[in-house]
Image (cartoon, rainbow, N blue to C red):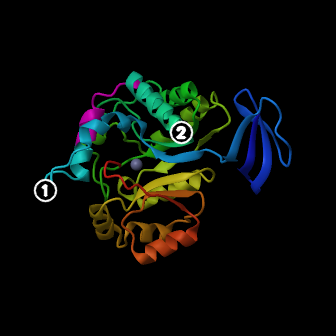
């Protein structure tokens, strides 16, 4: 039992709260009661926070990229290194790195994570025998460490704005809509093994990695659950999308898609005032990352 002088519950702050934990889960919550012998005592109790954006494998390359030479390094050179690193990643490593990262998250106070999962295939792009092999590796890592998982399989079809072909370093991400649908269905089966603090959504990677038509088709097919998308991450991405679609990324999204509280816009760093206001009114959440080394 945990007793707290005050606790933040769904109803707001409550006083003198006792929480019964059974089998690692909250079984009951009483309010306005007294502490009893053997209770673990606390003053203020808050729900653990969620980490809304993770590419867990990148945790392990952090030491390789936490340097920057002026005039030489940028987001794009960081991405090159990430692609080279990824060429060496095998399923066992992806699972181990995810488990390490999930464990570290829990040590830091996070109880759940949105894993924006985009490495799906073998080096060179060949599918694993089970197209959801690497999703299953993420599930195993969540299971082993106990973190609550929102699995966000990524649709990544193109290498850049206006249907650019995937570059070599992007072949492990690549799915057209058919492959994505198969992957999603297989992953959904694997996900059933996990406890009920598990969820699944979709992640069209970014405007630059899909097309307006495919995005519409995807959203028409998946009408429940969270939608996460990278957007307006880099000035070059903004200008590429503007040249292609005639609008800035967030501007385009707000005009063409029903952005609502299902949505989490990752980065949304380079927004105009108009885009910021529109995004705020939509009910979407922004996952704003201040670190340089994220994609
Ligand atoms: Zn990201």
Q: Residue at the location (39% across, 37% down)?
A: 119
Residue contact at pointers 1 and 2, CB within 8 angstroms: no
Q: What residue is pinned by disc 2?
A: 184
Q: CA distance from mark 1 to mark 2?
A: 41 Å
**Left or right position of 155 against 6:** left
Q: Which residues are magenta?
A: 81-91
Dot 1 falls on a residue whose secondary structure is: loop
Determine the residue positioned at 35% across, 48% down.
294
| Mark number, residue 71 | 1
Q: Percent position (x, y) of residue 79?
A: 26, 46
The percent coordinates of residue 188 (x first, y second) are 59, 35
Indicate yes or no whether the magenta region holds residue 89: yes
Residue occupying image coordinates x 35% and y 68%? 245
Q: Nearer the viewer, residue 156 or 228?
A: 228
Please say if 43 is above or below 289. Answer: above
The response on whether ligand 1 sits within 8 Å of label 2 is no
Q: Total number of numbered labels?
A: 2
Where 100 sits versus 169, above or below?
above
| Residue at the extreme front | 37
Of badges 1 and 2, nearer the viewer stands: 1
Residue 100 rendering spot, x and y as whole percentages:
44, 29
Asked whether residue 100 is drawn in magenta, I would say no
Front-most of residues 15 and 130: 15
Quadrant of image for the N terminus: top right
Main secondary structure along the magenta-highlighted residues: helix
First in sequence: mark 1 or mark 2? 1
128 relative to 72, above or below: above
Q: Is residue 27 visible?
A: yes
Apparent side of residue 150 relative to residue 28 in the rendered image (left or right)? left
């Amino acid at each position: 039992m945990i007793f707290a002088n005050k606790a933040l519950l769904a109803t707001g702050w409550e006083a003198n709260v006792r929480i019964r934990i059974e089998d690692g889960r909250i079984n009951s919550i009483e309010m306005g009661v007294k502490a009893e012998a053997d209770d673990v005592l606390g003053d203020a109790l808050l729900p653990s926070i969620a980490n809304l954006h993770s590419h867990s494998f990148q945790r392990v390359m952090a030491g390789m990229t936490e340097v920057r030479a002026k005039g030489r390094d940028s987001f794009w050179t960081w991405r090159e290194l990430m692609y080279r690193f990824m060429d060496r990643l095998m399923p066992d490593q992806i699972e181990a790195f995810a488990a390490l990262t999930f464990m570290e998250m829990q040590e830091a106070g996070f109880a759940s994570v949105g894993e924006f999962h985009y490495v799906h295939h073998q080096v060179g792009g060949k599918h694993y025998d089970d197209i959801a092999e690497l999703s299953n590796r993420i599930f195993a890592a969540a299971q082993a460490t106990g973190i609550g998982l929102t699995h966000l399989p990524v649709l990544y079809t193109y290498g850049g704005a206006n249907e650019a072909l995937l570059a070599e370093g992007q072949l492990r991400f690549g799915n057209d809509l058919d492959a994505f649908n198969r992957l999603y269905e297989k992953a959904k089966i694997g996900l059933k093994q996990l406890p009920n603090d598990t969820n699944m959504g979709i992640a069209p990677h970014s405007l630059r990695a899909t097309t307006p038509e495919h995005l519409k088709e995807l959203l028409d097919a998946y009408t429940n659950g969270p939608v996460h998308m990278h957007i307006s991450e880099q000035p070059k991405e903004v200008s590429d999308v503007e040249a292609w679609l005639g609008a800035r990324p967030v501007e385009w999204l707000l005009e063409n898609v029903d952005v609502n509280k299902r949505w989490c816009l990752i980065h949304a760093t380079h927004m105009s005032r108009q885009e910021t206001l529109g995004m705020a009114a939509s009910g979407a959440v922004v996952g704003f990352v201040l670190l340089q080394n994220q994609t």
